[in-house]
Image (spheres, rainbow, N blue to C red):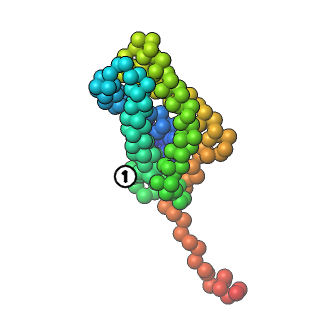
Amino acid sequence: MTGRAFRFYQRHRIVNVNLNIVGAGLLAVIIAKWPVHVVTGWVGDEYKFINSVIAAVIDGVVDIGLYFVLHWIANHWRASRPEHDIDEPDKPASFWREASLVQFERLTLTPAFYVIAIGGMWGLQHAGMRASWAFVLSFSAGLVVTRIAHTWWGLRSGRFERIPLRTGPAPMPKKATGADSDAA
């Protein structure tokens, strides 16, 4: 069952792109919470906007790194399985090209993400919430909103079509038979 779920994750672009981005985004928020807490404590509570921008930088670095790892797992890692059981694309896309293309698509949504994330963090801090928790809530909200927008865009453009697969070993090229060569 686990193998089937993993192959489903690898084959369905809409699933793996969204899970990779949401997974990287949420893990980045969890991982970055402590550094954000430390740095914003060092900068001071009175510099709320600066704290919000610092949180965005920390989150962005962690998020992109995690996304590249998850993208490789979803699209380029092949678990050890018997040769006849391997499902793989006919011609796998370049790791860097594909991962960078998704990051570029995300880049076009960063203005919306940062308005929600930084603006939300700034507003929640002004409402009295600690910077580290304001970071968690607002960056998670930005992730949800931009995920919905990116998914809609990917479905409309055709970028999230199912990855074509072949099952089993690659087909052998046909050899010319004596009858075929006599006809020539």
Task: In this rendered view, identify the residue nearer to me: 175 or 100.
Answer: 100
How many labels sit on residues? 1
Task: In this rendered view, identify the residue nearer to me: 62 or 90.
Answer: 62
Q: Quadrant of the N terminus?
A: top left
What x and y, as percent, mark residue 75? 47, 49
Q: Is residue 137 left or right of residue 33?
A: right
Please tell me which residue is depicted at 48% across the width and 17% down the height of the picture.
Answer: 123
User: Which residue is disc 1 drawn over?
Assistant: 80
Badge 1 amino acid:
Ser
Where residue 37 sits, quadrant-wise, is top left
Please identify the residue farthest to the front as the structure is shown: 46
What x and y, as percent, mark residue 66? 39, 41
Q: Is residue 42 left or right of residue 120?
A: left
What x and y, as percent, mark residue 61? 39, 40
Where disc 1 sits, the SS reads loop
Task: In this rendered view, identify the residue nearer to me: 119 or 103.
Answer: 119
